[in-house]
């Protein structure tokens, strides 16, 4: 019996008990009211529910008395071995070994789909993260946002949401012109412009541009800057894409800021101002156009168009937000770095000015800084620690897992020595080794003649098997919780606990018979359980973008 089946059976019992007193109240009960949880103390059973505390008030009964009334009905559920009431009305349930063990079959048959739920079904979410300027390589900060954003997209999708992960390419404005000037100066052997971009990569881009266009030196300056800017932009954006792909991060949408500025006079930015004005939140003052964002909690009103006719960055933010809404996304999530904390109020205010609910339709998640002991500044860029260097040094899996196991809002320092160890002290090794061990168990079982032709769940009676089954049953709830709370680190931490349960089980229960011992039903049942553990470890690692090796 899996948790969903138990919850459905419990709902029938609860509805029947409530109907005897209040038919209308019974009609409003759903599976969500059952709220099954794993007791922290396994002596209290396999599952606990607080449904009696939630529903007793609606029928005018003390919760504990209502819980006592539910006991006979719960005991009659197929597969339930024992029920007791604790505290003010908590109901603890212990399953028969066969009923509990059937979860292994459920997991193996579900395969990659196990852990996926409909918790966020019907939601359309645009998730924007990384969004680096295409003027240089990705650095250590981008590494964290890439790992967290991609993992969040995966758990959101696994929870039933329709999600588009989006990279906003900041490819318009002064920084792009300065980038072009910097590369051209490097190509022509000139001093870098004031506040220009530094680093060997600029020299490399300049050399490449000169190789492709030897006539740069004789070309009119404005034409040369534009040509080099566009060439270098394309090359640098391609490098960003390649760096992210190697880091196992993909985006559904690459959105160019340039789309918001063209055509002049009727661009999305022009239209955004008109749309905000129609909502009643735009006003004119001192020859400038303003948005009254203080109506929605911002600390000051924002200029959207200066008196000289030049739009501000806020104008692009407004047009970009409206673009997301126009593309059909009911909810937008921005994952921004620590230096963007001031954006929270203005983006929420922008949503309000556009006629949306700032508390419902937009989220701004701020990530904190990450550092790695001993990491060296990039030889190419000079003043940053590059993603490519980190990946080559520590590996994608170690980085992805380590960055995924902490909340985004916690400052983080990683220990490179630990991440390179092949010991149980290294969390990613510990979890991946558990997965590889499930495959070794399967290979050894096959060599010993243990098959999966039959599965008798009642054979899984060891305490370590009960604990392992309990951990496996938690996975769908953990994934849904990670998605709802926007906290993918919950999946990584869960995998560490699951790996610990599996290793303890492995040390206690043998799958392959020893010596001349014949193959027994218990061996087959344990092989199914090991397969189930491997499947969940694999599914969880996939959600955080980490590989699941079969041998280590």
Image (cartoon, grey):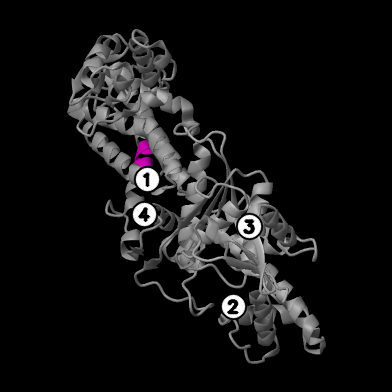
Apparent side of residue 501 relative to residue 281 in the rendered image (left or right): left
Which label is found at residue 348? none
Q: CA distance from mark 2 to mark 4?
A: 32 Å
Asked whether disc 1 touches disc 4, contact meaning CB atoms under 8 Å apart, the reply is no
Part of the protein shown in magenta: 432-440
Q: Is residue 433 above or below residue 316?
A: above
Residue denoted by label 2: 201
- Disc 4 on helix, strand or loop? loop
Q: Residue at x 42, y 58 (%)?
A: 399
Q: Residue 46: image x %, image y %?
A: 26, 25
Q: Residue at x 29, y 13 (%)?
A: 74
Residue denoted by label 1: 490
Asked whether disc 3 touches disc 2, contact meaning CB atoms under 8 Å apart, the reply is no
Q: Residues within 10 Å of mark 4 (few under 14, many from 20)?
A: some
Asked whether disc 3 touches disc 4, contact meaning CB atoms under 8 Å apart, the reply is no
- Please identify, in this view, whether the residue under mark 1 or under mark 2 is nearer the observer: 1
Residue denoted by label 4: 406
Q: CA distance from mark 1 to mark 4?
A: 8 Å
Q: Residues within 10 Å of mark 3 (few under 14, many from 20)?
A: many
Q: Residue 157: image x %, image y %?
A: 53, 40
Q: Residue at x 43, y 66 (%)?
A: 393
- Disc 1 on helix, strand or loop? helix
Q: CA distance from mark 3 to mark 1?
A: 40 Å
Which label's residue is closer to the chain start, 2 or 4?
2
Q: Residues within 10 Å of mark 1 (few under 14, many from 20)?
A: some
In the rendered image, is residue 330 in sight? Answer: yes
- Please identify, in this view, whether the residue under mark 2 or under mark 4 is nearer the observer: 4
Residue denoted by label 3: 281
Which label's residue is closer to the chain start, 3 or 2?
2
Q: Residue 401: image x %, image y %?
A: 40, 53
Q: Is residue 26 magenta?
A: no
- Disc 3 on helix, strand or loop? loop
């Amino acid at each position: 019996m899996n948790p969903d089946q138990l919850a459905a059976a419990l709902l029938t019992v609860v509805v029947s008990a409530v109907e005897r007193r209040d038919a209308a109240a019974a009609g409003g009960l759903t599976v969500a009211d059952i709220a099954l949880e794993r007791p922290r103390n396994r002596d209290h059973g396999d599952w606990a529910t607080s449904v009696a505390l939630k529903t007793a008030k609606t029928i005018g009964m003390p919760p504990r008395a209502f819980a006592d009334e539910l006991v006979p009905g719960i005991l009659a559920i197929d597969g339930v071995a024992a029920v007791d009431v604790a505290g003010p009305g908590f109901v603890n349930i212990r399953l028969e070994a066969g009923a509990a063990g059937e979860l292994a079959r459920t997991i193996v048959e579900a395969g990659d789909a196990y852990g996926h739920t409909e918790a966020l079904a019907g939601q359309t979410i645009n998730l924007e993260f990384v969004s680096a300027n295409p003027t240089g390589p990705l650095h250590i900060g981008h590494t964290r946002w890439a790992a967290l954003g991609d993992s969040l997209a995966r758990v959101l999708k696994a929870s039933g949401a329709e999600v588009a992960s989006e990279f906003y390419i900041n490819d318009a404005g002064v920084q792009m012109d300065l980038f072009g000037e910097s590369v051209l100066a490097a190509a022509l052997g000139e001093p870098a412009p004031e506040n220009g971009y530094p680093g060997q990569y600029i020299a490399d881009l300049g050399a490449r541009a000169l190789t492709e266009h030897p006539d740069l030196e004789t070309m009119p300056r404005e034409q040369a800057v534009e040509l080099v800017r566009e060439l270098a932009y394309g090359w640098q954006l391609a490098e960003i894409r390649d760096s992210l792909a190697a880091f196992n991060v993909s985006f559904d949408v690459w959105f160019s800021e340039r789309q918001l500025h063209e055509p002049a006079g009727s661009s999305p930015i022009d239209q955004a101002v008109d749309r905000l004005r129609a909502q009643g939140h735009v006003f004119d003052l001192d020859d400038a156009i303003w948005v009254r964002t203080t109506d929605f909690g911002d600390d000051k009103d924002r200029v959207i168009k200066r008196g000289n006719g030049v739009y501000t960055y806020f104008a692009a933010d407004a047009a970009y937000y409206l673009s997301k809404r126009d593309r059909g996304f009911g909810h937008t999530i921005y994952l921004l770095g620590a230096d963007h904390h001031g954006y929270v109020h203005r983006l929420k205010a922008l949503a309000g000015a556009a006629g949306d609910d700032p508390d419902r339709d937009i989220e701004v998640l701020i990530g904190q800084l990450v550092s790695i002991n001993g990491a060296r500044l990039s030889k190419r860029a000079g003043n940053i620690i590059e993603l490519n260097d980190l990946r080559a040094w520590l590996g994608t899996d170690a980085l992805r897992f380590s960055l995924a196991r902490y909340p985004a809002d916690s400052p983080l320092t990683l220990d490179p020595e630990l991440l390179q160890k092949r010991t149980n002290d290294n969390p990613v090794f510990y979890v991946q080794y558990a997965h590889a061990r499930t495959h070794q168990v399967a290979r050894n079982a096959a060599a010993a003649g243990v098959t999966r032709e039959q599965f008798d769940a009642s054979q899984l009676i060891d305490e370590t098997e009960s604990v392992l089954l309990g951990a496996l049953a938690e996975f769908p709830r953990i994934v849904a919780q990670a998605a709802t709370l926007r906290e993918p680190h919950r999946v990584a931490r869960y995998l560490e606990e699951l790996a610990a349960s599996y290793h303890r089980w492995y040390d206690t229960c043998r799958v392959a018979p020893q010596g001349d011992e014949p193959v027994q039903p218990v061996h087959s049942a344990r092989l199914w359980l090991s397969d189930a553990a491997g499947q969940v470890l694999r599914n969880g690692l996939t959600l955080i973008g980490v590989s699941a090796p079969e041998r280590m």
